[in-house]
Amino acid sequence: MKKFLRLIGLVLLLIVLLSVALDLIYTAVYLQSSHRGKVNYIYNSKDRKYDVIILGSSRANNHFVAPMFEEKGLKTFNFGMSGSHLFEASLMLKLMIERNYKIKNLIIETDLNISNEHRADGISAQFLPYIHQSKTISDHFSKEEDFYQLYYIPFYRYVAFDTRIGFREMYKTIKKEPTSYLEKLGYHALGNKKGNMKNNIANLKPLHNKYYEEIKQICKDNNINMIAVMTPMCSNVVGMDYFDKVRKIYPEIHNYEGVVQGDQYFSSCGHMNDTGARKFTAIIVRDFFKK
């Protein structure tokens, strides 16, 4: 019996040691990468200066054509991330401040995402390799139910989010395989192929969102001009009074939902194609960045 217990103890010790070793190896790889995505692009940088940064979900990533700002002499990057929520947008801005970014203007897409305060696991996982190195990241996750496991159990986060930060992504990071996330100054253009051209947002309820409040406070504390914007949707949407409800809670959010008319400008009901995005961006540049 004693031999069996010793064997079990030895196996457990080996598992712990292997987990610690793998955790250190994976983390070391991610700490050297700034080319695979927007999170490691921010984390492994410092002292960048921007006239305009853009944050939000795919409705920011696909709708704000960053090169069009640059054509007006505004150093710009679109940090919008498809599938993200305001949980991640707030953390990205905090991380930029931690990395001593100097930002004059922030355009934050705040429309459908104002209706939840949850994290988007697939996107938030990209911050987890740095959870021990960045107090900003660990503090942001500290109220999450699985924080203990993510922070204290070696290699747990890499197993739990294997599809995002596991072996495949780690291997591609080592090989320095390129992605398209950082091309076109972070803007991702959609084509004319039509997706779902119907949408029902009648059940969405805008919140007094704590992460939007964080973003506002960060901007105030760091003298950043915040421009909060609701972006266009196609014509076939049920529940369009949602945008009015958002304005009742946050009257400072600019409602640009209807400025691009015509489904020929949309790739899906909630996402404009490149032509629509350029039409929309021209309006934003005109309205907020007149010389």
Image (cartoon, helix red, strand yellow):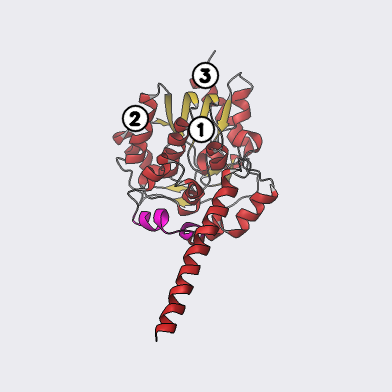
Kindly give the residue lying farthest to the front in the view shown.
2
237 or 4, which is in the foreground?
Answer: 4
Location of residue 139 in the rendering, given as x and y in whole percent from the top left corner:
36, 43
Q: Nearer the viewer, mark 3 or mark 1?
A: 1
Magenta-colored span: 145-158
Question: What's the distance in space between the residues labelled 1 and 2, CA to CA?
Answer: 17 Å
Asked if one can make out residue 196 in the rendered structure from this viewpoint, the answer is no
Q: Residues within 10 Å of mark 2 (few under 14, many from 20)?
A: few
In-image side of 48 versus 222 (left or right): right
* Residue at screen point 46% across, 60% down: 156
The residue identified by callout 3 is: 289
Question: What's the distance in space between the residues labelled 3 and 1, CA to CA?
Answer: 14 Å
Which numbered tag is attached to residue 54? 1
Location of residue 115 in the rendering, given as x and y in whole percent from the top left corner:
36, 46
- The tag earlier along the polypeptide, 3 or 1, is 1
151 vs 221: above or below:
below
Q: Residues within 10 Å of mark 1 (few under 14, many from 20)?
A: many
**Label 1 sits on what residue type?**
Ile
**Labels 3 & 1 near each other (Cβ < 8 A):** no
In-image side of 193 versus 208 (left or right): right
Q: Residues within 10 Å of mark 3 (few under 14, many from 20)?
A: few
Q: Regarding mark 1 in the picture, which secondary structure is present there?
A: strand
**Label 2 sits on what residue type?**
Gln
